[in-house]
Image: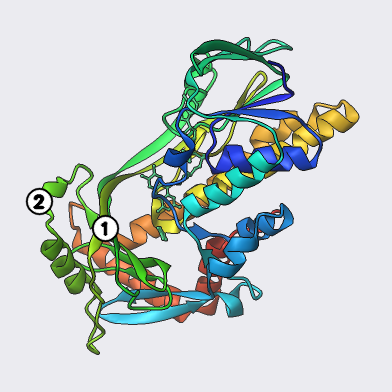
């Protein structure tokens, strides 16, 4: 097999890249470890930045998100038993965010990709990258009982944090910057109408909590927990009881309960590798960086990377110049670090740290008071949350 760009992984990064390249007339093959059913049903992120939704419209995959996505013009920050709203439309030039589950995005993108007739090779086992420093790199893998070789001009490593792309870079080339957090999130899906039309981020002395949603009938709720929390210690009634405590307000606001259909614990980490390129291998999305979910940026940052990569590949194939490809890593990293900063800042603002330092608690509350009382501070939150502009 031969193509121009071999894309490893059919997550948001890989699928968006394939559609962007197709629009530029650049051929690609996607090599994906799992089945279509698996990637289309994996419960993950749910919040799309303004630019991510716009890109879906531009690529002709915005039909369902326009109909089924829930546009949110603000969020609530709840602390000291009171909620304060941050109004995005007012503070971020009319922009908003959209609630639409990541696996629904994947369904829309995969359907559009397959409709082009170009391949997603599902259940491709043991993918390995070769000759990434040479003019003609290639990928080998096992597919449909056959050992395959895919020759290409470039490889896009879009295979997430645990993929093989980053691990294929020779030792000494990449520098890792990382920070672990001493907590995780216990996330649930519940068949319960969300108790608020907008997301609620709670600072509470028992720990952080978040109310999100997937539809007018389904709530998505998160509780700060230990990074290695044992789910068997969390029967449904304990989860609801803890959620009620953290969301409690002075004015008797009530959380709606319903049957819990999914429970999982997610760890929290900030992670970046530099550079995001080695020879003809370009890393994008979670393969290159991870953010804690507090700012809801993981998926959106993956999309931002592949916009840059597609433009650079387009420039290369139309002009023969590798100039934009050479700038890929530096261009992406400017945004990556701003988004890392924002995600870290939201995380340290809202979570309870194990040392429970009273100074830090007071500082967090002062920060929240300032943030919700100052237009300048609210505006900074709003412009980061809806998504920083691209230029
Ligand atoms: P991925 O979505 O990880 O896609 C990588 C793809 O590569 C997958 O399809 C995988 O099967 C495939 N792959 C992996 N290894 C190989 C291989 N060896 N060969 C071929 N294919 C391979 N972000 C938020 O903003 N909010 C959230 O609430 C949130 N929750 C999350 C919960 C979990 C459990 C996880 C893991 C992530 C969560 N994220 C969240 C982060 C967000 O989902 C990711 O940032 C986003 O999926 C990144 O997209 P990606 O395409 O870079 O990587
Ligand atoms: C979600 O809906 O899953 C979600 C929303 C906002 C976040 C994180 C997760 O900050």
Please state the total of marks drawn on the protein image.
2
Q: Secondary structure at mark 2?
A: helix
Q: Residue 111: horizontal and vertical position, in percent?
A: 61, 46
The N terminus appears in which quarter of the rendering?
Answer: top right
Residue 178 is left or right of residue 27, and the answer is left
Q: Which residue is mark 2?
A: 233
Report crowding for label 2: few under 14, some 14 to 19, many 20 or more residues within 10 A (C-alpha).
Answer: few
Q: Which residue is mark 1?
A: 261
Distance between the Cα atoms at labels 2 and 1?
17 Å
Report crowding for label 1: few under 14, some 14 to 19, many 20 or more residues within 10 A (C-alpha).
Answer: few
Q: Earlier in the sequence, mark 2 or mark 1?
A: 2
| Ligand 1, image quadrant it occupies | top left
Quarter of image, res 251 = bottom left
Image: 131 above or below 233: above
Image: 126 above or below 381: above
In-front residue for pair 239/105:
105
Q: Residue 183: horizontal and vertical position, in percent?
A: 25, 49
Image: 294 above or below 142: below
């Amino acid at each position: 097999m031969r193509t121009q760009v071999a894309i490893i992984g059919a997550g948001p990064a890989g699928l968006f890249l394939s559609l962007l390249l197709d629009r530029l007339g650049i051929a690609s093959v996607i090599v994906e470890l799992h089945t279509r059913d698996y990637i289309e049903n994996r419960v993950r992120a749910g919040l799309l930045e303004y630019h991510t939704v716009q890109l879906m419209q531009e690529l002709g995959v915005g039909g369902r998100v326009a109909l089924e996505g829930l546009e949110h013009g603000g969020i609530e920050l709840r602390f000291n038993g009171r909620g304060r709203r941050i109004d995005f439309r007012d503070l971020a030039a009319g922009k908003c965010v959209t609630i639409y589950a990541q696996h629904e995005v994947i369904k829309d993108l995969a359907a559009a990709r397959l409709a082009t007739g170009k391949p997603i090779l599902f259940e491709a086992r043991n993918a390995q990258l070769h000759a990434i420093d040479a003019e003609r790199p290639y990928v080998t893998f096992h597919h449909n009982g056959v050992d395959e070789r895919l020759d290409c001009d470039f490889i896009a490593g879009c295979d997430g944090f645990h993929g093989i792309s980053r691990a294929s870079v020779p030792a000494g080339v990449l520098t890792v910057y990382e920070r672990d957090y001493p907590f995780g999130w216990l996330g649930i899906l519940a068949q319960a109408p969300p108790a608020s039309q907008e997301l609620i981020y709670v600072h509470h002395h028992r720990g952080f909590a978040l109310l999100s949603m997937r539809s007018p009938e389904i709530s998505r709720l998160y509780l700060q927990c230990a990074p290695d929390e044992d789910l068997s210690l969390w029967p449904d009634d304990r989860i609801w009881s803890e959620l009620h405590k953290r969301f409690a307000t002075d004015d008797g606001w009530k959380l709606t309960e319903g049957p819990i259909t999914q429970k999982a614990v997610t760890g929290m980490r900030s992670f970046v590798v530099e550079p995001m390129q080695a020879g003809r291998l370009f890393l994008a999305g979670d393969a290159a960086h991870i953010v804690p979910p507090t700012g809801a940026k993981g998926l959106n940052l993956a999309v931002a990377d592949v916009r840059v990569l597609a433009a650079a590949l387009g420039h290369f194939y139309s002009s023969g110049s590798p100039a934009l490809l050479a700038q890929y890593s530096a261009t992406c990293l400017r945004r990556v670090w701003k988004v890392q900063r924002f995600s870290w800042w939201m995380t340290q603002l809202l979570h309870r740290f194990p040392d429970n330092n009273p100074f830090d608690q007071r500082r967090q509350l002062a920060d929240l008071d300032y943030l919700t009382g100052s237009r300048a501070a609210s505006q900074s939150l709003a412009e980061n949350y809806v998504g920083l502009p691209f230029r």
